[in-house]
Image: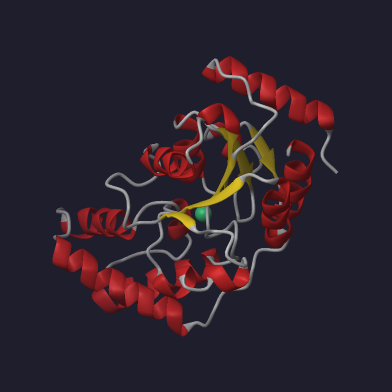
């Protein structure tokens, strides 16, 4: 159950930080994908690590949780700078991302995040538009969304749509534009510090959901307006809010 006082305080803090009210009539809920709709982050981390091993790039599987939300090209550039002292050109980014994507696909499809379907169904029934806002370009998982979430995500921002990935606010601002919504009538749901930062900087009421190995408070520190421990809690909060 969501404590109503905690939610009320979070909305007051949102207004203090942005100067905006949070409208009673929410028009759009923007969902991140990996670690929110799918329990896919452990698989992504293993896929990145296997690509690095094959390419002679030193890396630790756990470090990829910290890069969550970045575009693939941004992560590859970071790895290249560290290993070789220079960035990776576009061809290299495409080639290495293709290897990582193939590794991920070979692991089979990741499970849905518990609670995520109920959260999305709550939004669909309540009336607001659902918008996908992901830094991912992973075709194998994007192709599954329609089946797993019954067409709820016709509006999508993916790695292919943005110049600046998370933590830049661009992905969430584009998500708002696609829904035709303004900040004060939207809510964002993200599980990673970089994603939370992106949504928060876009001026959206940001629900941080700790579905992975993050310490308590890490998403509040990144700019979340409220931090929850699961998508089950998020579903409860959305039914309270909508
Ligand atoms: Ca995520």
Q: Can residue 54 be seen in this view?
A: yes
Left or right of 26, for residue 160? left
Left or right of 131, for residue 87? left
54 and 111: which one is in front?
Answer: 111
| Residue found 59% across the figure and 56% down from its top | 36
Q: Establish if 147 lies above or below 82.
A: below
Left or right of 181, for residue 139? left
| Residue found 67% across the figure and 32% down from its top | 25
Q: Establish if 27 lies above or below 32.
A: above
Q: In which quarter of the image is the C terminus?
A: top right
Quadrant hosting residue 82: bottom left
47 and 201: which one is in front?
Answer: 201
Say how the picture is coloured: secondary structure
Left or right of 36, for residue 80? left
Q: Is residue 224 visible?
A: no
132 and 106: which one is in front?
Answer: 132
Q: Quadrant of the N terminus?
A: top right
Residue 122 place in picture, x, y as percent: 73, 52
Tally of numbered discs: 0
Quadrant hosting residue 68: bottom left
Residue 67 place in picture, x, y as percent: 41, 53
Q: Establish if 140 lies above or below 13.
A: below
| Residue found 69% across the figure and 62% down from its top | 117
Q: Establish if 219 lies above or below 82.
A: above
Residue 78 place in picture, x, y as percent: 28, 53
Residue 113 place in picture, x, y as percent: 66, 64
């Amino acid at each position: 159950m969501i404590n109503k006082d905690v939610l009320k305080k979070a909305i007051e803090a949102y207004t203090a930080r942005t100067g905006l009210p949070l409208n009673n009539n929410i028009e759009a809920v923007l969902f991140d994908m990996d670690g929110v709709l799918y329990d896919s982050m452990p698989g992504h981390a293993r896929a990145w690590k296997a690509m690095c091993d094959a390419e002679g790039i030193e890396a630790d599987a756990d470090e990829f949780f910290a890069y969550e939300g970045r575009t693939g090209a941004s992560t590859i550039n970071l790895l290249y700078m560290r290993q070789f002292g220079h960035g990776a050109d576009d061809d290299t980014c495409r080639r290495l991302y293709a290897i990582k994507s193939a590794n991920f696909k070979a692991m089979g499809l990741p499970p849905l995040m518990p609670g995520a379907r109920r959260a999305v169904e709550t939004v669909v029934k309540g009336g607001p538009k659902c918008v996908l806002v992901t830094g991912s370009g992973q075709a194998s998982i994007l192709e599954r969304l329609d089946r797993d979430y019954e067409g709820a995500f016709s509006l999508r921002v993916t790695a292919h749509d943005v110049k600046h990935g998370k933590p830049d606010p661009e992905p969430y601002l584009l998500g708002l534009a696609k829904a035709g919504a303004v900040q004060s009538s939207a809510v964002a749901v993200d599980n990673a510090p970089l994603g939370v930062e992106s949504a928060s900087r876009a001026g959206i009421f940001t629900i941080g959901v700790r579905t992975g190995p993050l310490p308590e408070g890490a998403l509040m520190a990144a700019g979340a307006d409220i931090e929850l421990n699961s998508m089950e809690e998020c579903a409860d909060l959305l039914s309270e809010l909508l």
